[in-house]
Amino acid sequence: MKRILVVGSLHEKDPSKNPIKENQPYDEKINRFKAACLALGWALAKTDHVIMVAIPEWKMLKDCDTACNFVMVGADQASSEVGKKTNVIFYGPREIAPEENLTPDTVDSFQELKSLEHVDITPGYLSHGAFKAKLITNVNDADGVIIIGGTDGTATIGYAACSMHKPIVALPSLGGAAQQVHMDVLQDEYDQLISTTDVRGLEVYWEPTMEDNKENALNVVTIIDKLIAAKNKSSKKVRNALMITLGFQLCFLLAWMVFFLAASRCTAEQALCGLIVNVAFFALLFISALLGTGLRTLIAYHEEKLTQLTMSGFFLESVISLILAFALSLFYLIGGISFTGGVVVLDTYGSDSNTFNAFATISISMSLIGLAAGYLVPLTQLQERLNNIISQEQK
């Protein structure tokens, strides 16, 4: 079962306590928020998801303006319909929850949440401190995140989930932080992972009654499941491609050693020795270029600069690195003639140490050129990489 974290709150406070300019009555806003949260809890329980909720301060339950109050009640209702319990992971403060219950008709305390018959609560704890970052604790444990309304704390969860590459759904029509996160970072991601119809499904108007929102809530749960599947599929593809890349790296390294040792042991008496040596030079050059390409790919993944890897893309960059390596090797050979007047001979005959040293020097030089060419590809990053190397040398 997938674990879905639901976070949010009514982002506008009661104007009777804190007068603000209202575009629509406060009661309608809180009814829409409450009905949306109830429907989301109902839909998640109906589809056998594990629900995760969080309360950074106990008094927020009493105010009845957080998603937690209503999501769990909605889940309890759905579970009672099917006759089984819904698992809820409840993250709360480490302080002991107050036991007073001044409003018995409203679920606004932890004791009342625990008394819900069809909800099985697993306790979790948030870190100490007043900073909003303490809410991030439960993001890592979730398979997906749904944010609704909210202010700074909800925004922290939304942006943290995005930076951690967690599947996230923000419901923009209820305003608040969810609307901001949806507009800022999620729309581009949605375009890559889900259809336009699904995106429109997240922007629907939420009615002030739970029954009218059930279809929308089920649609939201379907979309978060699609995002989780798409993220998992993408991650699996990247992992497979990286494993293949690592396997190729080992094969290329072994091939380099075979060519180097085979060519270095050639003698004049052996047939086709000259051909073997000449082929070995270019084989070592091209193998080193492929090693450089693979090395750059693995480093990019380690530094989290790589989000997508395909074999066709790797093949294309390998071809470019081979061409660049060949061009650089020609500069190396021409440079030797230009500056020293000597001609680099690629044929090696005999088994004396001088012959082997000449072969080894040129071979290793070619290999370093190929390795550099593969690592510096793509060409658009060549200048940046060279600048980084120069800046590090200056330090």
Image: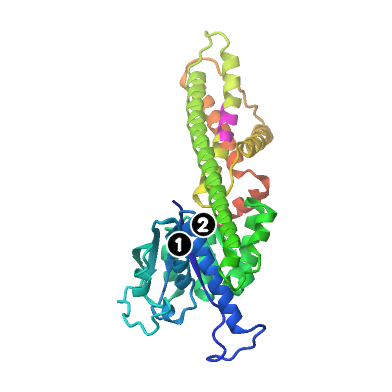
| Image side of residue 71 versus residue 200, left or right | left
Query: As rendered, which of 244 and 173 lies closer to the eye?
Result: 173
Residue type, numbered disc 2: Lys
Residue 11 x, y percent position in the rendering: 55, 78
Q: Which mark is residue 139?
A: 1
Residue type, numbered disc 1: Val
Q: Which mark is residue 8?
A: none
Residue 119 x, y percent position in the rendering: 38, 63
Residue located beneath label 2 in the image: 166
Name the residue: 55% across, 71% down: 35
* Tags 2 and 1 touching, CB below 8 Å: yes
- Magenta span: 284-290
Looking at the image, tell me whether mark 2 or mark 1 is earlier in sequence order. Answer: 1
Which structural element holds mark 1?
Answer: loop
Query: As rendered, which of 123 and 112 lies closer to the eye?
Result: 112
Name the residue: 56% across, 30% down: 287
Callout 2: 10 Å neighbours few (<14), some, many (20+)?
many
Q: What secondary structure prevails in the magenta region?
A: helix
Name the residue: 36% across, 65% down: 117
Q: Tell me: residue 145, above or below residue 288.
A: below
Q: Tell me: residue 211, above or below residue 325.
A: below
Residue 34 x, y percent position in the rendering: 53, 73
On the image, which quarter does residue 292 sit in? top right
Residue 210 x, y percent position in the rendering: 55, 69
